[in-house]
Image (spheres, helix red, strand yellow):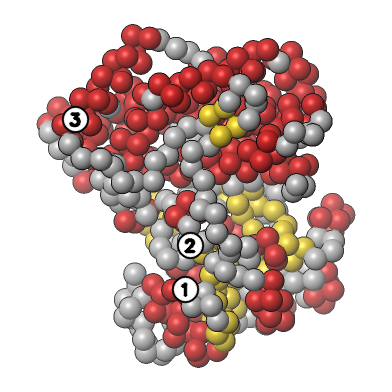
Amino acid sequence: MPDIHSIIVRSARALDSLAVALPQTAGFRRETGDAARAAERGYFTADEDERVRSVFARYLGIRAALHETITELEPVLDAGDLPRDLHLRVFTIAFCAACLLVRSARYLVDHFAQSKVVWRKLDEAEPRYGIPRKQFSSVYKSVTSLRNRWRFQQAVEFARDHMDAIRGLASCPVVGGVVALLAEEHPEAIRFSRRVEARNRLRYWLHSLGRRRKSTLNQVSFALFEASGRFIAELKNPLHEKRVTPQVVRATRRLLRPGDALVTRHDDAVSNLFLPGYWPHGALYLGSRRELRELGVPLSGERWQRSAGRVRVLEARKDGVRLRLLTETLRVDAFAVVRPRLSPTALGLALERAIEHEGKGYDFEFDFNRSDRLVCTEVIYRGFHGVGGLEFPLTSRVGRPTFSAEDLLDLAIEGRGYEVVAVYGENGNNRLLQGHAAHEALARTYREEARNGPSGRPAAP
């Protein structure tokens, strides 16, 4: 059994970030107007297309993250010997995530399913975000499924029978915020209209009949429970062992230096879904306490305690910007290591700036205009940009300034303030490459033009 307390803490933190980022009614007003105008004229203009698909991509990313949170809680709820108090905390977090999924999916269907023009637009594939075809149809199917409705109702009844006990968790420092969030989401999620849901089921059936072909997509359906309290999510990561082994982690640790960026990839589609590029994620290697002291990096008392032991990495995930173990960060299938070319003084300053963001929430909007919540690469950007001559050029994506993991790799491939140290698992190759061999192999993973080494100036992807 995994560390239940860590799972509860991590899941509660993730809900905090996800709930804030999930588009609300006010956030959909402009896109709803765009959809109405497109439906009337029969097509989307370019700017309307960008706005509607941007908010839909953000919704899908948050939805996938909610499912991952639920999936992580499932084996805990399955444990037959789990103390009642812990079982109730896990159930509360999972049920709150389910309510978020149900409420947001219903809103999306109610506002965007009435027009075939809008439906077709949201069903289009979007390679920039790694979104396959017919994702809106998948959302719609989950909302109209009688099976899903019955299973969610089982969770509603369990929550109703134990609501006093759930409210009693409001004073708990870990799940108290979840209880407050559940009080907001629960009434809307359990709202049920037989007439509206029958209409939606008929509309979806007619649409499916007209399409006349079965979707082969990875279906994304909302969180489900059984009467026993067991939680079942239909979206799960494929059950395969990660290709980065403990031996590879030990070999990599010997190569790492403070300030190195770890860019990672999972082979399974769920982890990569809605994140652009072959390399979707980045983290910052901090080094040991001794190495940080030598670089003159100050840590507050609480951060000093959190950095104890083998904690070496500062990484933003759905539970926020946290100090993590290297083994946790490298529980992946492939990774690359790139290193900034900075003096010890400049490196210490950059690390100090980056660590100051520890404890912030995750930014599911990928908006570099805000700094109260950070996306994974933004941790590196906000620490290192402008230090020692390093420049991180932001790229406008769907109208927002961003810096992706592959934008960071561009700096190393082109020799602009970073260099490639190592790469492992690229394109399925289970070997740890270093130096020039690593540089060439890394370039081939996402830039077919970049074959001339650091002196080349191939076009950005």
Residue hosting label 1: 428
Q: Tag 2 or tag 1, which sits nearer the N-term?
A: 2
Q: Is residue 370 left or right of residue 91?
A: left
Callout 1 amino acid: Gly
Rendered image quadrant of residue 351: bottom right
Residue 44, position as x, y percentages in the image: 19, 39
Number of marks present in the image shown? 3
Residue 364, position as x, y percentages in the image: 51, 45
Secondary structure under the numbered disc 3 in the rendered image: helix
Secondary structure under the numbered disc 2 in the rendered image: loop
Residue in view at x 65 percent, y 24 percent: 228
CA gap, disc 3 and disc 1: 40 Å
Secondary structure under the numbered disc 1 in the rendered image: helix
Q: Are marks 1 and 2 in contact (CB under 8 Å)?
A: yes
CA gap, disc 3 and disc 2: 34 Å
Of all residues, the one furthest to the left in this rendering is: 41
Q: Which mark is residue 267?
A: 2
Crowdedness near tag 2: few (<14), some (14–19) or many (≥20) residues, C-alpha within 10 Å: some
Residue 192, position as x, y percentages in the image: 44, 12
Q: Is residue 177 left or right of residue 5?
A: left
* Residue 435 to residue 69: above or below: below
Callout 2 amino acid: Asp
Residue hosting label 3: 209
